[in-house]
């Protein structure tokens, strides 16, 4: 059984591939995702004052996985991505809770 910070399955481990990593830059390929995840993730990253640039590219919607690019003013870009993902998950959980309360 996975702990809170560990992926549930081996498939989840393989979902994100680090293409480039330096002190202030990271490029990640995220398998099986599209604009639905990457657009809010990029927006969440840009809320962080230490993020200089956050963008993504999908070469071909049906044939390629998106590549997320993050450049930091200061700090670890991978940690910024992890923090943004956790914040998005929290936002989605709050939305779900409020939605369910509203439809009851």
Image: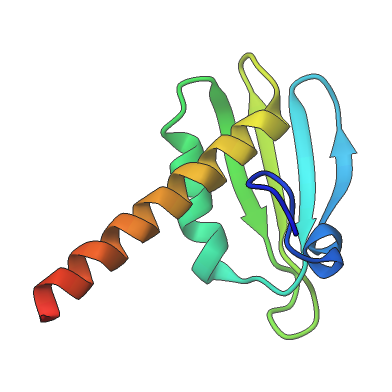
Judged from this view, the residue extending furthest toward the bottom is: 62
Left or right: 3 as drawn, with respect to 10: left
Which residue is rendered at x = 30% and y = 67% of the image? Answer: 96
Q: How far across and down, in percent of the image, does residue 3 sit?
A: 69, 48
Q: Examine the rendered structure and indicate whether residue 12 appears above or below residue 5.
A: below
Left or right: 43 as drawn, with respect to 31: left
Of residues 36 and 71, the one drawn nearer to the viewer in this rendering: 36
Q: Examine the rendered structure and indicate whether residue 103 appears above or below residue 45.
A: below
Q: How far across and down, in percent of the image, does residue 32 sit?
A: 72, 74
Q: Quadrant of residue 15?
A: bottom right
Q: Examine the rendered structure and indicate whether residue 33 appears above or below residue 6.
A: below
What colour scheme does the image use? rainbow
Which residue is rendered at x = 63% and y = 47% of the image? Answer: 4
Q: How far across and down, in percent of the image, does residue 1 sit?
A: 75, 59
Which residue is rendered at x = 45% and y = 55% of the image? Answer: 40
Which residue is rendered at x = 78% and y = 44% of the image? Answer: 27
Q: How far across and down, in percent of the image, does residue 11 sit?
A: 83, 69
Judged from this view, the residue extending furthest toward the front is: 1
């Amino acid at each position: 059984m996975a702990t809170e910070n560990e992926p549930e399955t081996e498939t989840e481990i393989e979902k994100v591939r680090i293409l480039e990593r330096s002190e202030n830059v990271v490029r990640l390929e995220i398998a099986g995702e599209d604009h639905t995840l990457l657009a809010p993730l990029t927006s969440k990253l840009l809320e962080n004052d230490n993020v200089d640039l956050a963008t993504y590219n999908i070469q071909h919607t049906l044939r390629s996985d998106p590549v997320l690019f993050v450049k930091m003013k200061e700090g670890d870009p991978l940690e910024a991505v992890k923090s943004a993902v956790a914040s998005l998950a929290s936002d989605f959980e709050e939305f779900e809770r409020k939605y369910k309360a509203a439809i009851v």
